[in-house]
Image (spheres, rainbow, N blue to C red):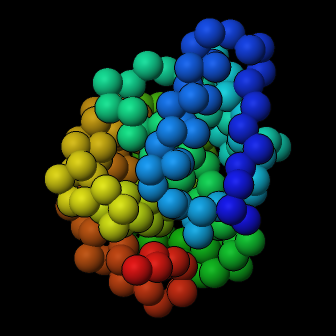
Amino acid sequence: MNKLNITTKNNSSTELATKEILETLLGKWDISQYFFTDNVMIEDRAMPHSHPALTINSFPYNDQIMHLTDLLHEQLHWYFEEEQSLVDEAVVELKVHYPEVPVGHPLGCRDETSTYEHLLLCRLCHKITSNIFGEDESRQILYYLQNHHYLWVYDTIDKDSDYIDSLLDKYSLNIIKD
């Protein structure tokens, strides 16, 4: 899958500008090896989500690479869906290591399982952004995310990255390609 079909929900000026930014960034960095669905919708004020259609919003980030980070994050949901049995096995270990996790905004995700899965997904996304954009840029992205949503998740992957990395490797979920 080399090309994304990027559409806008309302063809607003902000959606079209975000589409242009995303296409420019995708021309600069080839991240196609991390695409698991080829349809992307841009929608003003939408909460980024992966299903039923991968949707990102037109939020005017100061750092435009955040649009690629949102795209990667939502693409990884599609990957985790393909590898759900492996993700489930890793979650069993996470539940032992972290017997209680927060649920709900701003610390956790919509439910307990989602919070556990996001420990893996967000760490993998951080590893990918480090690999593509470099550690300095990736740390800035992580710092931004640690202060906006999934606060406990991002704080935990920052503090306990070696453990989470070991699970990504153990369950063959680490898809970083050099």
Image spot of residue 126 (x, y percent) = 36, 59
User: Residue pushed farthest left?
Assistant: 136
Residue at (36% x, 83% y) in the render: 166
Q: Is residue 55 above or below residue 153?
A: above
Q: Is residue 74 at all visible to an observer of this figure?
A: yes
Query: Residue at left 51%, top 77%?
Result: 175
Towards the viewer: 18 or 158: 18
Q: Residue furthest right?
A: 52
**Quadrant location of residue 149?**
top left
Residue plotted at (54% across, 87% down): 172
Left or right, 99 with respect to 87, comes to left
Q: Is residue 104 visible?
A: no
Q: Residue 157 placed where, x, y %?
A: 31, 60
Residue under the point 41% across and 38% down: 66
Is residue 8 depicted above or below 84 in this figure?
Answer: above
Residue 116 coordinates in the image, percent (x, y):
50, 60
Residue 15's x, y, as percent? 63, 19
